């Protein structure tokens, strides 16, 4: 099978068919190479990972759920190395092509899954989101993408990174497919529609001005769909950059704990930037970790307060559309840091978030995100459906 | 050509013949893959290095000198990644076999050059020594090896690491070949024999007791050959560990400066441990660097004081024979640190040092080093010849 956008892991393509007659019969899906597929080595985006880990005997739980519902798995997709990356440029496997903006990165770490769906090679694809790895490629590639409530999906058979933030999510080009997959993975039909809409004024202010401008029509449509008037709120009173800093104290420490035994035993090859991030995680002081844990509690309290039943909050998924491919490490450092300012709330508070496509800046997609109360994943899917119907 | 000890860089073997009738006619040599060979990509032990650097148009100066003298080059040898390694285990190319102790590492970073000579695949081989990369594999593989006076050989066409410590050296199984190569590269015949022998009491005390014991007969032979009685001296009054600390403040900073532009532009894959070393280099404070520069001056003054014309100093090349292959990063950290305690003087003071074979501990080779005044490289070769004749 050809791979016009370099979305799939090089080598023979794994293929597993679901039984006929299920709710997802006729749909195809791809799987980020962090999820186990029985009999296929899980690559994890690092060529030394599979050598040190056994070939899985079973499918990851969410893979099994999609197969049981009748969908056909058509391959495993490129991921940023050990899911540590937000832009989708892999030193091992290269950069999947962002069909919507081919000179720009696809976003990561679920880069291949987003690229495969965006190019129409499959109907949906599984990704993971710890610090933005579904949300960012959704925004950059112009897709529907969800980071579910933390703990909502069973992550058995998924290569972990930072367990207190790890989630599994999925992409789709259209809201119907997006919601249908949700019906299977969440075990719940879309709904109910929220009735109150908050607008994260700090996040809109932090995004590029062109982004806030480009998203205005979508916000207006969202208000209309919900039959309400959006109300400005500060999402992070302590500062988006303060929330980001807390997340950058917590997530890399957990990632280092996750990968340290493998690294210390095998001294694997890693992209320099990935190694640097893990080493930074190993050097975060107990004092900084302690502060970050408290700030996480504050962020959780704030999001809980903002999002009672029936309320959603909207914000730009990313502060800008996808950056150009092939930039240097120093050039990309502030890019990643700014993305984290908008995404950190996901890992910190664990609320469900959907990125909706529908806007562009200079021809490149940019997503509008909606966040609901914990457990209201199905309500967000209902909003996606309503937004598509109203488009 | 087969490669029974995995000494050569994988792929087609570079081969260049020297003209007939030269002083090295009939001799074969191998070249560490840090030296340029015209028309062959210089790999540097990292699979992303050659992609970012042009194929050299000329041979490195020392390669050209050996060819001009009639020797035949038979291939390029495996090196620790960007010469940052002392044990010879490469995450990219694997570990060359130490013929003298096959379950142990060969030492690095000139691992393949040492392994090729030790296995009899060539008569001599070029290596480099910044922090011990010729001396350590000489000791571990039971070879003659020289770290020349810093600045003595022309390093044109050599991939640098830490220029204030970088040197090019060579290995041989026998002293005649060893000295013959020296005649060409130094432009000087062996001699004169020193007349005074110092014994670095701190270094012998720091080495494993079995090592000091095993080297006693060689020290006795050395005294006899020179017709003198060895005199105990403290080499590093400030502490071997203090000299090592100074070298570990200086060398990684220079290495980071050397490789930073490539790393920041290309985000290359590197073994985690190599990336960690470079990042450590990027984090050394100006205060530590300033202190280390002063300690280097003290070390230089000390070595100059100890080694007037006609005097050499002997010490164990390494504190122990080669460690076992395949150990973890944490297990190897103290191993590397102890090696640095005996090797740091080379990078700090730049004196010439020859490692002489002839002793074993538990069946594994261990080298006795001799150090002379700066510029007395040929005198050390004369000692090697005399030691072999007296064996």
Image (cartoon, coloured by chain):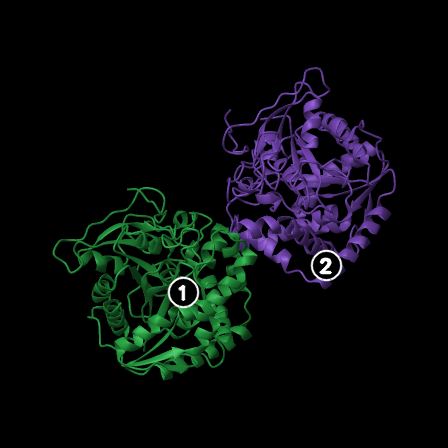
Chain colours: A green, B purple
Please state which of residues B214 and A253 is positioned toward the viewer in this rendering. Answer: A253
SS class of the residue under badge 2? helix
In front of the other: A132 or B85: A132
Mark 1 crowd level (few <14, some 14–19, many ≥20, 10 Å Cα): many
In this picture, residue A95 sits left or right of residue B225: left
Residue A157, numbered circle: none
Measured along the vertical axis of the image, is residue A136 above or below residue B319? below
A350 up-or-down from B186: above or below: below
Report whether residue A36 is seen.
no
Q: Nearer the viewer, mark 1 or mark 2?
A: 1
Residue bearing the label numbered 2 = B289
Instruction: Examine the image and state in which quarter residue B293 appears.
Output: bottom right
x%, y% of residue A217?
Answer: 35, 71
Residue A132 is marked as 1
Q: Position of residue B147 (x, y in %)?
A: 72, 39
Chain for numbered disc 2: B
Residue B79: x %, y % from top left:
58, 39
Determine whether, in the image, residue A279 is placed left or right of residue A233: right
Is A298 positioned to the left or the right of A127 in the image?
Answer: right
Front residue of A361/A340: it is A361
B227 vs B213: above or below: above
- Badge 2 density bin: few <14, some 14–19, many ≥20, Cα 10 Å: some
Give how far across and how far down residue A386 sits, in percent: 24, 71
Q: Residue at x 55, y 65 (%)?
A: A283
The answer to whether dots 1 and 2 both sit on one chain is no
Quick one: quadrant of the C terminus of chain B? top right
Q: Spatial distance from mark 1 to mark 2, Cα to Cα?
A: 39 Å
Does the image show residue A241? Answer: yes
């Amino acid at each position: 099978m050809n791979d016009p956008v370099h979305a799939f892991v090089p080598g023979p393509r794994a293929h597993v068919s679901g039984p006929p007659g299920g709710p997802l019969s006729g749909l195809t899906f791809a799987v980020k190479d962090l999820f186990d597929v029985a009999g296929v080595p899980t690559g994890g985006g690092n060529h030394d990972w599979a050598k040190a880990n056994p070939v899985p005997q079973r499918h990851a739980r969410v893979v099994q759920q999609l197969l049981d519902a009748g969908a056909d798995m058509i391959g495993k997709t490129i991921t940023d190395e050990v899911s540590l990356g937000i832009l989708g440029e892999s030193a091992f496997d290269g950069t999947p092509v962002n069909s919507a903006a081919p000179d720009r990165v696809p976003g990561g770490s679920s880069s291949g899954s987003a690229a495969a769906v965006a190019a129409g090679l499959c109907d949906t694809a599984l990704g993971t989101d710890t610090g933005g790895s579904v949300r960012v490629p959704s925004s950059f590639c112009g897709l529907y993408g969800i980071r579910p409530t933390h703990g909502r999906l069973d992550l058995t058979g998924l290569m972990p990174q930072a367990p207190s933030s790890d989630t599994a999510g999925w992409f789709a080009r259209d809201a119907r497919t997006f919601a249908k997959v949700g019906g299977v993975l969440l075990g719940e039909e879309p709904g109910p529609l929220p009735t109150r809409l908050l607008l994260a004024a700090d996040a809109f202010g932090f995004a590029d001005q062109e982004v806030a401008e480009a998203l205005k029509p979508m916000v207006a449509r969202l208000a209309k769909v919900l039959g309400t008037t959006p109300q400005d709120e500060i999402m992070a009173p302590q500062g988006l950059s303060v929330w980001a800093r807390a997340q950058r104290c917590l997530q890399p420490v957990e990632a280092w704990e996750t990968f340290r035994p493998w690294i210390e035993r095998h001294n694997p090859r890693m992209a320099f930037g990935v190694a640097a991030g893990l080493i930074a995680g190993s050097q975060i002081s107990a004092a900084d970790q302690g502060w970050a844990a408290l700030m996480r509690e504050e962020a959780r309290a704030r999001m809980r307060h903002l999002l009672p039943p029936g309320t959603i909050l909207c914000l730009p998924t990313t502060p800008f559309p996808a950056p150009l491919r092939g930039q240097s490490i120093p050039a990309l450092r502030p890019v990643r840091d700014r993305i984290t300012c908008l995404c950190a709330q996901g890992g910190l508070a664990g609320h469900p978030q959907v990125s909706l496509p529908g806007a562009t800046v200079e021809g490149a997609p940019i997503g509008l995100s909606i966040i609901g109360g914990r457990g209201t994943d199905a309500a967000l899917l209902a909003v996606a459906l309503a937004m598509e119907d109203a488009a």
